[in-house]
Image (cartoon, helix red, strand yellow):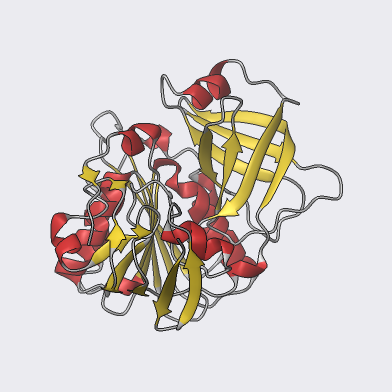
Amino acid sequence: MNHNVEVLPSQKQFECEADDTILSAALRANVILPYGCKDGACGSCKAELLEGQVDYGTYQARALSEEERVRGKVLTCCAKPLSAIKLKVRELSGLGDIPIKKMPCRLQSIEKPAADVAVLKLQLPANEVLQFNAGQYIEFMLRDGSRRSYSLANAPYQEGGIELHIRHMPGGLFTDHVFTTMKEREILRFEGPFGTFFLRDDSTKPVILLASGTGFAPIKSLLEQAFFKNSTREFVLYWGARTKADLYRMELPLQWTQAHSNFRFVPVLSDATSECAWSGRTGFVHQAVMADFPDLSRHQVYACGAPIVVESAQRDFSAQCGLPADEFFADSFTSLADTSAVAGQGGIA
């Protein structure tokens, strides 16, 4: 049985099949709702259930707390309608014009700027172009049928192939291959682009960018596109890492600082004990933001990287710095371990 889904305030409606998630049905109907991991681990697709019943599906407890669930929140990537429903969630415009494609690509080059980070340059087939918004990601389709997601690190305006920054996850099916046996000219297959992490151009608010580790990749894409479009908004990038070596492309934000008067860069190390020459900021990266911006009520925040960093920033920026909930945008880099360690279990409401 199909169930009708109405999205407010846009009043868009679409049909959802009994075994389909709300998000999948929405995307097929070209109704673009916010989402990230699509696995119930990041919470980016959270919406408010106003009417009707859903099967919540299986999800991470940190993505949807019991308190939020009591208040009527659902994760559209996991929830399936059991009746006609009404949802309150902000629909996104523009992304529906970008086609999602499956295509092969060839590894053009692989560089390791840090011991556990690889920068891949991928060549697309002749006459093929991948349209995407800065901040989106692609999914590699592996031979066993599994998928691995990585953010695009190059900006949409840049012609040619695509760039990815991949951190080694020891024991990982794909990243072990990247760091041991992957060779140039290897053929890979991917699908994309996916995700709703992109700079909201309808705002003029100053922007705080928060990256941990390879969360720098989508931030790089977003900033390079903003600079290309001559954005006059104020941008401050806080890039957190354990050691200075983990700031694997620090020369880029330093160059942006020199080239763009509306950009500032604040690197933050959580383990600076071995950095004899380090005179910069130390500690948790999101706390450095709070120290510099105790009032975030007139800002937008874009956060990327480890789930614990994104979750801490979202919680503390809102509770302690007055950041409006709808001005926090995130791309939480969930791993297979994150999506496997499921804590939230189904139920109906």
Please name the residue shown 45% across and 83% down the image.
11
Residue 301, located in which quarter of the rendered image? bottom left
- 130 or 348, which is in the foreground? 348
- 68 or 325, which is in the foreground? 68
Q: Is residue 210 left or right of residue 198?
A: left
Residue 72 position within the rendered picture, expressed as x and y whole percent measured from the top left:
21, 68
Q: Is residue 69 left or right of residue 100?
A: left
- 237 or 210, which is in the foreground? 210
Instruction: List the single residue furthest toward the top.
Output: 181
**Count of labels in the image:** 0
Instruction: List the single residue furthest toward the right.
Output: 127
Residue 349 position within the rendered picture, expressed as x and y whole percent measured from the top left:
22, 62
Assign the N terminus to one quadrant of the image: bottom left
Please name the residue shown 32% across and 37% down the image.
338
Work out whether residue 281 can be spotted. Answer: no
Please name the residue shown 39% across and 46% down the image.
39
- 86 or 257, which is in the foreground? 86
Instruction: List the single residue furthest toward the front.
Output: 1
Residue 284 position within the rendered picture, expressed as x and y whole percent measured from the top left:
23, 47
Work out whether residue 330 can be spotted. Answer: yes
Residue 251 position within the rendered picture, expressed as x and y whole percent measured from the top left:
52, 46
Residue 58, located in which quarter of the rendered image? top left
Q: Is residue 275 left or right of residue 146?
A: left
Q: Is residue 188 left or right of residue 274?
A: right
Depicted 37 relative to depicted 92: above or below: above
Residue 51, located in which quarter of the rendered image? bottom left
Depicted 154 relative to depicted 107: above or below: below
